[in-house]
Image (cartoon, rainbow, N blue to C red):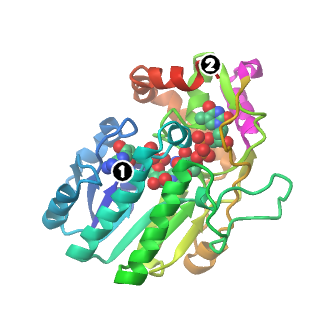
Amino acid sequence: MTILVTGGAGFIGSNFVYYLLEKHPEDKIVCVDVLTYAGNMATLRQAMQNPQFRFYKTDITDRQGINDIFEKEHPDIVVNFAAESHVDRSIENPEVFLKTNILGTQVLMDACRKYGIRRYHQVSTDEVYGDLPLDRPDLFFTEETPIHTSSPYSSSKAGADLLVLAYHRTYGLPVTISRCSNNYGPYHFPEKLIPLMIANALADKPLPVYGKGENVRDWLYVEDHCKAIDLIIRNGKVGEVYNVGGHNEMKNIDIVKLICKELGKPESLITFVTDRKGHDLRYAIDPTKIHNELGWLPDTKFEDGIKKTIQWYLDNKDWWQEIINGEYQNYYEKMYGNR
Ligand code: NAD
Ligand code: TDX
């Protein structure tokens, strides 16, 4: 089987590529990534040595380029990770989010219709459900929770989800969607909370916590997300949405304190800064459906996953230092300089 993975040079896509190469060595993996600021060939160095793996530097909004790849590679399954993924960037500049996340999804699905496909899988997010109040721990997002977005990022992801379901209903395209909670693990780009705090703490730099740090996120080790997607593309029901999450809710401030503790750094590095605009309060996934239908359960507990992740950043300083020494410095100054 040939699986086309878009966004495979990013955080979750690359972890998925490595997951497939190990778990299904019989499958051919075709990776499509345009290598934005978030895509990194260093991440795919090992995959590039594998004869089952092939890479195309192509934009998912480039219809001709995508059609050419379909004609050449005849993918059986497409898994779309390619996206602009950072909420703060979407607040600064929404346009590219709409282009990549919505129009890119359309171009991929049009190619699927044109050339035929066994499955188109859309990697979506719990953020499409908006947020939950902090004082109602009894509430969770189910697949029936209405779409109710807060940021340009989550709106673009929700728009794509609606389009995917419309392509199923209107054209009969065999689609599935997964909506996962916050991931963490190796190759996470250092603009995101956990790797940013690790990198700053190691450099004894301030740790910028938005607002009071009371916002809650539901963290899942990236490999468990990969396992869920692999199950959905092989055994999931066409036309269905599956929520993915491991019931691991934590306040941001507690995560940052934990990182300080693990690295032996003082909590005095924590600096409270101006809150994110429209900041979602709490995300919490109810994963009952994927558990009952596909037998999915996470393997990695947060206590172990965060230790493994911190160790990975200690062992792979070259990977992230190269990033933060480049264009990232301008980004950091712009976002945090006067915050
Ligand atoms: P990321 O930003 O680390 O990686 C995105 C990748 O997509 C990069 O390699 C980038 O080069 C590529 N890309 C961007 N625009 C492209 C384009 N126009 N054409 C081709 N490639 C393009 O993102 P991530 O955190 O790995 O997220 C992957 C997917 O998972 C996204 O769709 C995101 O919405 C979703 N998701 C992420 C999380 C999370 O916690 N990170 C949680 C749930 C869902
Ligand atoms: O410097 C920071 N300080 C801070 O307090 C950063 C970068 C973040 N935060 C807060 C904001 C959030 O409440 O930490 C929390 C996590 O922030 P991000 O890492 O930016 O993730 P989030 O906004 O929750 O979105 C992530 O999960 C869902 C991914 O980036 C999305 O792609 C995914 O869909």
In this rendering, is residue 95 above or below 337? below
Answer whether residue 258 is magenta in the image.
Answer: yes
1 or 2: tag closer to the N-terminus: 1
Q: Main secondary structure of the magenta part?
A: helix
Question: For residue 118, which quarter of the picture?
Answer: bottom left
Which quadrant: the C terminus?
Answer: top right
Q: Badge 2: few (under 14), some or many (20 or more) residues near its Cα, within 10 Å?
A: few
Q: Which residues are magenta?
A: 251-270
Closer to viewer: mark 1 or mark 2: 2
Question: For residue 273, which quarter of the picture?
Answer: top right
| Residue 186 place in picture, x, y as percent | 49, 41
* Amino acid on which the number 2 mark rests in the picture: Asn
* Amino acid on which the number 1 mark rests in the picture: Gly
| Residue topped by disc 1 | 7
Residue 263 can be seen in this image:
yes
Mark 1 close to ligand 1, CB under 8 Å: yes
| Residue topped by disc 2 | 338
Residue 20 can be seen in this image:
no
Answer whether residue 104 is magenta in the image.
Answer: no
Q: Is residue 77 left or right of residue 256?
A: left
